[in-house]
Image (tube, rainbow, N blue to C red):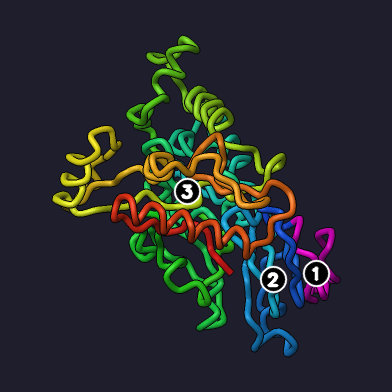
Amino acid sequence: MSAGDGPSGTAPLIERDADLSRLNTFGVAARAAGLARVRDLDALPTVLDAPEWRDRPLLVLGEGSNVLLTRDFDGLVLRIEAQRIQQSHWAGDDAVVRAEAGRGWHDFVRWSVDAGFGGLENLSLIPGTVGAAPIQNIGAYGVELAACIEAVEVYDRATRGFDLLDRTACAFGYRDSVFKREPARRIVTAVRFRFGSDWSPVLSYPGVREELAARGVVSTSTPADVSDAVSAIRARKLPDPRVLGNAGSFFKNPLLPQAEADALVARHPGMPRWDAGGGRSKISAGWLIEQAGLKGHREGDAGVSAQHALVLVNHGRASGAQLLALARHVQGVVHARFGVHLEPEPLIL
């Protein structure tokens, strides 16, 4: 029996009128009607089918690093806290590793690089859990999570059973997936990662190669070297949510048709852009916000980070509603200046 679970065959205890302020990285005040912490995945159906909660709203919360709570939640908050990692099998020369949803994301990345597996190192130091990662199809420094996923294990609330979705069925897109498009249906319980034997470092994103060069390991870099370099870059650029409440990048980098991006760059020659395929370009949301004069902007305790314009921060006592108002202000100013709509990354409740 895991600590915090009830006796075998029973559901974990559910905390009522639960305080969520320490369960979201913005640190905003909010409460939930109920909070269930599940360490035994087999207990999930019992929790979800309990009469008191069956017809109430459900919010699956990992580390709370990609959510903005603007009000109390009159339903059940579910935290998957199962954390086991196991190498399930070899597929030719590739290794398939299964990690349960409650494992901390960066902790799992470090486990993988320490084991000699390459593929996730560019995603180092991203806050959150393994279970949250495929929902957003997290990406950073030239790598998207989807490239390393073999399959995702879920509990399907529609069929009331456990299921396995291969990478194609996950329908991954830019910061998108079937899990994000149908948030009420599937709960991620574990992720299976495939690590290839033909690994080579992805150093195309600005700053990564330079950081490795400063460490003298460009030509000999290992997955652990790249992880260390990316972690150092992120630590310099982004505020630590343990010190200053934030949810990391708050806005997605806009994807624009090629002709629209060409016209924008012609008017603003310094605008960073990348080819996104399919006749589209990705432009930097952080650059747009900074050029709009909003880097370091503050409205009470709700602010735009002075370190990185893409990050909204809570300087102390900002409410979720105040942070949302600031986000809408940023969207309005950027649209007025550049004609580009910024889409938030976090789930906004």
Residues at discs 1 and 2 in contact (Cβ within 8 Å): yes
Residue beneath the point at 62% across and 65% down: 321
Q: Nearer the viewer, residue 71 or 45?
A: 71
The three-letter amino acid code for the residue at tag 2 is Val
Residue beneath the point at 43% across and 13% down: 213
Identify the secondary structure beneath mark 2. Answer: strand
| Horizontal arrangement in the rendering, residue 150 relative to residue 187 (left or right) | left
| Horizontal arrangement in the rendering, residue 6 relative to residue 173 (left or right) | right
Q: Which residue is mark 1?
A: 18
Identify the secondary structure beneath mark 3. Answer: strand
State which quarter of the image contains the C terminus: bottom right
Q: Which residue is mark 2?
A: 77
Give percent across and percent down for residue 306. 56, 36
Report crowding for label 3: few under 14, some 14 to 19, many 20 or more residues within 10 A (C-alpha): many
Report crowding for label 2: few under 14, some 14 to 19, many 20 or more residues within 10 A (C-alpha): many
Of the two numbered discs 3 and 2 in the rendering, the one whose residue sits closer to the viewer: 2
Quote the CA–CA distance across marks 3 and 1: 34 Å
Give percent across and percent down for residue 186. 52, 72
The three-letter amino acid code for the residue at tag 3 is Phe
Quarter of image, res 141 = top left
Identify the secondary structure beneath mark 1. Answer: strand
Magenta highlight: main SS: loop
Q: Which residue is mark 3?
A: 193
| Horizontal arrangement in the rendering, residue 191 relative to residue 165 (left or right) | right
State which quarter of the image contains the N terminus: bottom right
Quote the CA–CA distance across marks 1 and 2: 9 Å
Of the two numbered discs 3 and 1 in the rendering, the one whose residue sits closer to the viewer: 1
